[in-house]
Amino acid sequence: MTEPSKLDISKQKSYIEDDEENVGPTIVSNEKNEDSFEIPVEIKTSEEQYYNGEEEDYEADDESSPINIQSSVRNGFIRKVYGLLSIQLIITFGFVLLFQIPAIKKNILTNIHLAGNILICSSISFLFLFLILACCRNLSRTVPYNFIFLFAITLCEALSCSIVSACYSFEIVAVSLFLTIISTLTITFYACTTKTDFSYLRVILYIISIQLFMAGITSILLRINILYMFYTYLSTIMVGIYLVYDTQLIMGKFGLAYSVDDYIFASLEIYIDIIRLFLLILRIVAQASKKN
């Protein structure tokens, strides 16, 4: 019996290696031969990309990914809302300070009946325009009609706040403005940083607001000062909660959120919260100054 030659043995080994390549992946040994040399190979798969053995995290930097697009759209919506809100507050508080000029203030106080009629007309106009904008959401999303409504509502509310503020001294109005700014910034910071979800408190806030409104009417009709002050303090707390609620709807951090097309209505909601907070703080500061 003849012994197999070295050529036959090498052929058998090559057949075995070819069969192993067809069956599964090849396992490369880490042992190095003296006569062998290494060739660097780049391997890129469809799911992962490697370069020199390091994985590239390209998905996190991809600006066209759906997550980044959604966040950029929301950030643009937030900038638009607070840009409009800044213009509204500048107009409103500018009117308030303008009506503190002694000549204008004197004309308002000497013609108190005319000022009262203007206050009633501006309040009714504000309510009428706001209801139209709230009921017709398509109108609030149509340019330029949404900006026209927003500007008209802001003028009506600025006129009402200015006439009410003219009945108080400049010191009281200045302190109330300062406290309103500090309170608004603090509440907004809390709404943006807290992990508590206030976006599901709509029904509860509406119920409490109706009860507070009835308590306020009762205190005015019966002329109960203690009940009126109690109503004022509770309303201030309630408006602060409303400000947190509306801010979280704008930020979209939790379950409920404003649509990115409702920037007019969102800025109007925050604006109303801040103006209500200012008027309530104005009453509290005026009442505290009387006691002193």
Image (tube, rainbow, N blue to C red):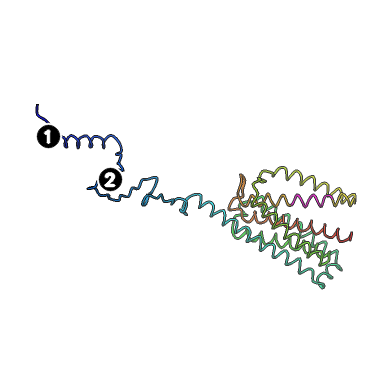
Q: For the point 45% across and 50% down, which residue is it?
A: 59
Q: Which residue lies furthest to the top in this view?
A: 1
* Crowding near the residue tagged with mark 1, few <14, some 14–19, many ≥20 C-alpha atoms within 10 Å: few
Q: Where is residue 275 in the image (x, y as percent from the top left)?
A: 74, 58
Task: Say left or right for 162 vs 221.
Answer: left
Quarter of the image with the C terminus is bottom right
Quarter of the image with the N terminus is top left
Q: Which residue is labeled 2 in the image?
A: 32
Q: Position of residue 211 (x, y in %)?
A: 79, 44
First to last magenta residue range: 230-239
| Quarter of the view holding residue 178 | bottom right
Q: How many marks?
A: 2
Name the secondary structure under disc 1.
loop
Q: For the point 65% across and 56% down, which residue is it?
A: 267
Compare residues 284 and 256 and report the one nearer the observer. Answer: 284
Is residue 50 located in the magenta-colored stretch of the structure? no
Q: For the point 76% across and 65% down, which residue is it?
A: 96
Q: For the point 88% across and 50% down, which residue is it?
A: 226
Is residue 232 located in the magenta-colored stretch of the structure? yes
Q: Distance between the residues labelled 1 and 2?
A: 27 Å
Three-letter residue code for mark 1:
Ser
Magenta span: predominant SS is helix
* Crowding near the residue tagged with mark 2, few <14, some 14–19, many ≥20 C-alpha atoms within 10 Å: few
Q: Position of residue 103 (x, y in %)?
A: 82, 73
Q: Residue furthest front?
A: 34
Name the secondary structure under disc 2.
loop
